[in-house]
Amino acid sequence: MMTKSFGKSDVNELVSSLSWLEEDGSSQDGDESPEMRGRNGLTLASRMHSCTELGSEDMEEEEEEEDDDDIGPNGENAPKRRGPKKKKMTKARQERFRARRIKANARERSRMHGLNDALDNLRRVMPCYSKTQKLSKIETLRLARNYIWALSEVLESGQSPESHGFVEMLCKGLSQPTSNLVAGCLQLGSSPMMLNKLEEKCGPGLAAVTGQAHTLSFPSPGLPSPPYGSLEASHLLQIKGFKGPAYDNPSSTECSSGTPPYDGPLTPPLSISGNFPLKQEPSPHDSDRNFSSHVGHHAQYLSSHHYASAGSLTGHQGHPLFQPPRFELPLDVAFDSFAPSHLVPSQMGSI
DNA sequence: TAGGCCATCTGGTCCT
DNA sequence: AGGACCAGATGGCCTA
């Protein structure tokens, strides 16, 4: 017979742990979406459900099991079970267990929110960022990895950040829509003005390299946007010469999510430390369709840094060396109108 | 309607 | 004992 009373500390713990009831109901974040509220409403139901479950049947079963422990199938005394003896699930223990579980759930929620915040921060420094059309988690991680790899290549081999190879590196292992997006953003980022600056900084040698980039560059800023979120299958970009397994190897396995599997380790030829640009907070001018041309500017910074071309580009507060231009873009534009000619599906055949 | 993505709950494991 | 982390399960939302 359990005689431990339900102490004051237990009550306090339970009360504090139940604060989620208020928090969830009153939207502690302020910007909670209706979907979120709906979800919380549902989880509330499931919580209540699991509470009642634990409080009735489970506990009774456990106590019955406990009682039968020492009695064999024929009624004789069976050998004692080894290991720590299971404690009885008394009412007080059950309450504490429940309170602990609720606290653990809250911690887990906040942990996942922190993880998602970190992912959001990562999305913001990716070459293509949109508040409304977020990259999925897995695509964000893949693109981040590719981005580091590609920028490292820029440093190692002097490859132009506007080159075809750079786009290929960025898109390696990404799903086709994400590849389209990245390629589209890069076109916007490689404005003639920026390329000119790059040439100024790095000299005619780089100008020769970026000659290819000029053929890729977007005719003028202010023209159509990439069809972010409104891609049609016929507009999907297929990257020519792409060596990703899922694109040119029909036998390669595809993951269930529809995104191509990543083909083994990409080892970035990273030989620098601490040279990556400082993180920039998104400008307050960011609109839903602002595509910051991080790639070009990160790479531009890296190039100028790497090749020791001193001198300031801008006096930007966030970072002294580069200041990404931002483009206001319309929504409903077909990708074909600005896709680089060598990346247009019609010239590629099917893959 | 199926599939992808996501948030949440939950139990297990490890560590302090 | 309790917290952090992880992975599986579940159910909702969205889109093709």
Image (tube, coloured by chain):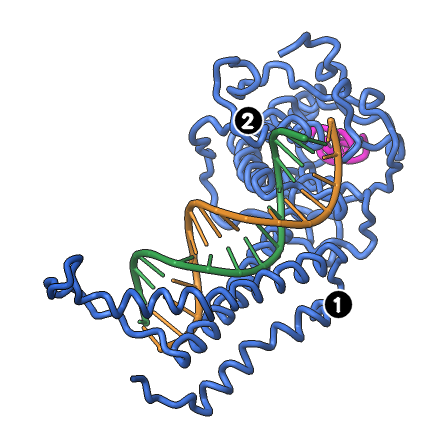
Chain colours: A blue, B green, C orange
Name the residue: 55% across, 56% down. A115
Q: Decide if residue A39 is on the left or right side of residue A100.
A: right
Membership of A33 in magenta stretch: no
- The Cα atoms of the two marked residues, 1 and 2, are separated by 37 Å
| Quarter of the image with the C terminus of chain A in it | top right
Chain under label 1? A
Residue position for label 2: A260
Compared to A192, does A98 lie above or below?
Answer: below
Name the residue: 76% across, 57% down. A34
Label 1 Cα crowd, 10 Å radius (few <14 / some 14-19 / many 20+) = few
Q: Which residues are magenta?
A: A183-199
Q: Position of residue A95 (x, y in %)?
A: 45, 77
Residue position for label 1: A30
Amino acid type of the residue that numbered disc 2 sits on in the rendered structure: Pro
Q: Position of residue A314 (x, y in %)?
A: 75, 50
The main secondary structure of the magenta stretch is helix
Chain under label 2? A
Name the residue: 87% across, 28% down. A333
Amino acid type of the residue that numbered disc 1 sits on in the rendered structure: Gly
Label 2 Cα crowd, 10 Å radius (few <14 / some 14-19 / many 20+) = many
Q: Looking at the rendered structure, which numbered label has been put on residue A298? A: none
